Every structure is written in structure tokens, then in C-alpha cells.
Amino acid sequence: MSDMMSLIVAEIGIRQLHARYIDAVWRKDYTAFADCFAHDCEWRIAGTIVLGREAAVTFIGRMFDDFKSIFVQLSTPILKVGDAQASGRTYFTARNILKDGKPFAPMGMYYERFVREGDAWRFKWRLFQTHYAGPPDLSGTYNTNPDYGPPPNMPPLDAVA
């Protein structure tokens, strides 16, 4: 398969992964959420390092408890594709309602490593950088995060979220 065809096939699969992830979060479907992650995944988010698929489900369950609804939007990922693996960055926004009824609209970026596992692409390693956290009017908190340069540059695997 040509490099261009490999990129196209991987991008379609990874965009489907992102779509499955968005749907699982919206519906708070733990089984579908788990299926988005490799068994031996690593997820670095909110100062936490989550190791393994089961731990990812436990972590998101604690987050679900704080929200009435979570609506995630992910941009088209910028990808570098290898053999049954890929890396990329994906911009993230969300429009959420907390349990107390307050709106919460974070923005950030995922640095991601993907793996083809079984019949689908899955998250192998993710680092989330929060760029903004607060209400939708953007009056909340802005964060400064390390800049790892233009794609395909990635943070080191031990980078802190």
C-alpha cells in the first residue's frame, strides 16, 4: 500500500475512533468507552496518569459523576502514520453542564498515539493539555503549556499533563 493510501486508511480509522469516543462520552457508555482504548493504554490527563483500559473506565466514571452532560468536539487529527500505529494531535472543545447546572466549556489539545488492535484503531497513549477551563463566555482560566513544535513533533512519553 502506498504511503498516501496508508495515511487515508489510518485517518479514516482514527476519525472513526474519535467518533466512537465522542458518542461513548455523550451517552456515558462505559463498554463503548473502554473499546476506544488499547488494553495497555496510558492516558495522561488532569495531573493523573491512568494506566490500562479498566483504569481509563474508572477515571471517566468519576468524571461522569460531576456532569449532567458532556458534549465533546474533536478536530480533524494531524497524523503521522506508521505500520499499524500512528501519532498525532487533535484539538478539543467541549460544551458541558455540571451537576449543579453551571455550563463548563474547556478547550485543549490531545497529543495521541494510536495502535491498530484487532478490528479497530484504539488509543495507546494520550496526553491532554488544558488550554482553557471555565464558562462558555471564555471568562475562565487560561493555561500555559509546553509547545512541542509543529507536527509531527510529540511530547516525550513521560510528559506531565
Image (spheres, grey):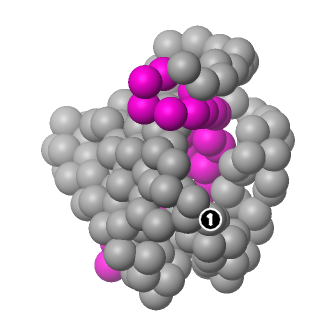
Amino acid carrying label 1: it is: Asp
Residue at position x 62%, y 65% in the image: 66
Above or below, 79 relative to 15: above
Q: Can the viewer see residue 81 in this picture? A: no
Magenta segment includes 125: yes
Residue 111: x and y in percent read: 56, 38
Going by the image, does 61 lie left or right of 55? Answer: left
Above or below, 76 relative to 16: above
Q: What is the secondary structure assignment of the residue under circle 1? A: loop
Magenta segment, prevailing SS (helix, strand or loop): strand
Residue 88: x and y in percent read: 46, 37
Residue 122: x and y in percent read: 45, 65
* Quarter of the rendering containing residue 13: bottom left
Disc 1 packing (10 Å; few <14; some 14–19; many ≥20): few
Circle 1 residue: 66
* Quarter of the rendering containing residue 142: top right
Q: In the rendered structure, which segment of residues is drawn in magenta?
A: 109-138
Going by the image, does 19 lie left or right of 143? Answer: left
Taking depth in this image into account, of 118 and 48 the one nearest to the observer is: 48
Residue at position x 61%, y 49% in the image: 126
Residue 31: x and y in percent read: 46, 87
Q: Can the viewer see residue 94 in this picture? A: yes
Residue furthest to the bottom in view is: 31
Residue at position x 69%, y 78% in the image: 58
Above or below, 120 relative to 45: below
Going by the image, does 101 lie left or right of 21? Answer: right
Magenta segment includes 132: yes
Residue at position x 50%, y 13% in the image: 150
The quadrant of the rendering that contains the C terminus is top right
